[in-house]
Image: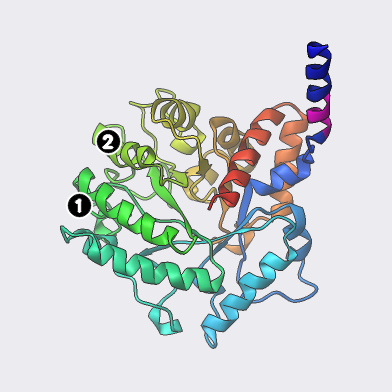
Amino acid sequence: MGDNATNQNTTSEKKKTIQVPLDTMIGQMIMIGLNERTALSATDSLIKDLKYKIGGIILFEKNISKDSSYARLKKLNKELQKYALTPLFIAIDEEGGKVHRLKEKYGFVSMPSAEYMGSFTSTDTTTFYSLRLGKQLQDLGINFNFAPTVDLASNPNNPIIAKVKRSFSKDPEMVVKHSLAFINAQHKYQVKTTLKHFPGHGSSSSDTHKGLVDVTKQWQFNELIPYKKIIESGTCDAIVSCHVINCHLDTTCVPSTLSPIITTELLREVLGFQGVVFSDDMQMYAITKNYGFEKSIMMAINAGVDVLVFGNNVNSQDRTTASQIHKTIKNLVITGQIKKERIEEAYNRIIALKLKK
């Protein structure tokens, strides 16, 4: 009798399980830029895709109107959410300094560089600016910040990190200290954050926007310290993979975003991170010039990337749509090149993060 009761309960539980359509799960894995949009019209082609083919939007400075900037951006974000069946990640890169989309000239708050904030032993300055930023992001309807950068300033001539003051410090302990202050302040306003760029872009000597970057000879294990300690703190929402090649970590020498050894084995199995992994922009030349559209999507998802970012911050002929990305992923699943279980795994992580308080 006990066994029958258990079986009935199990059957009942199975009936309660809601099967999420494949189309919906795939859609949550797509984050896309808005091209030059600063508003949505009632006939905008994006509206249909927002229903189930887009899980997130990434904003750039070009999406900010030159007049009534604050009010119009707030309205745009509200309308984007209105059309989405599942609440969107509305994201922006707000590290401060050079990577600062919401500039003061549009009426937004100032945000100094990570280098400036990290120059203080105390985290009071970092906390002050991050709290002020978080309050503004929340009011604008932006719930996701692609910051902080936890890359070390290990190469002072690095054109994409140290030279443009995006790193808190060359000392990993200082990077951890200021990053935690930044993250905790953003969390007070329900803004999710990321650590970037895994497994470390600080030692590079060139830019993955422009082509392949190999850090094999320069990269050091201390570049993993910020990831390890912030993951252990329990405050890490998400991690952004980078497109650097590191043959010490993966002898196949593929960019980290496309590497299951780096994205799954190192990040998840060794460092213990079970949250959402975002790709760096899939339209950077390190990817597009060497792997192509379909192949890079397949490799990234199979490597363990949960959300593919296509910023469309490129020439018009190189831009893509959510429908094109969605169709490509679905075809890769149907043909068995990506397992449905991998899609389900990514979807569950994304939804868990969206529900996280």
Assign a secondary structure to mark 1: loop
As shown in the figure, which amino acid type bears the numbered disc 2? Trp
Label 2: how many residues lie within 10 Å, few (<14), some (14-19) or many (20+)?
many
Q: Which mark is residue 219?
A: 2
Can you tell which mark lies on residue 156? 1
Magenta-highlighted stretch: main secondary structure? helix
Q: Amino acid at mark 1?
A: Pro
Q: Toward the viewer: 62 or 306?
A: 306
Report which quarter residue 15 is drawn in: top right
Q: For residue 115, which quarter of the picture?
A: bottom left
Q: Earlier in the sequence, mark 1 or mark 2?
A: 1
Q: Considering the image in quadrants, where does the N terminus appear?
A: top right
Q: Is residue 68 left or right of residue 95?
A: right
Examine the image and state in which quarter residue 338 appears.
top right
| Position of 119 relative to 344 (above/below) | below
**Label 1 environment density (alpha carbons within 10 Å; few <14, some 14–19, many ≥20):** some
Task: Write down the region rendered in magenta.
Answer: 11-15
Query: Residue sitting at 76 percent across and 57 percent down?
Result: 51
- Residue 120: give x, y in percent of width and height: 17, 61
On the rendered structure, is 57 left or right of 258? Answer: right
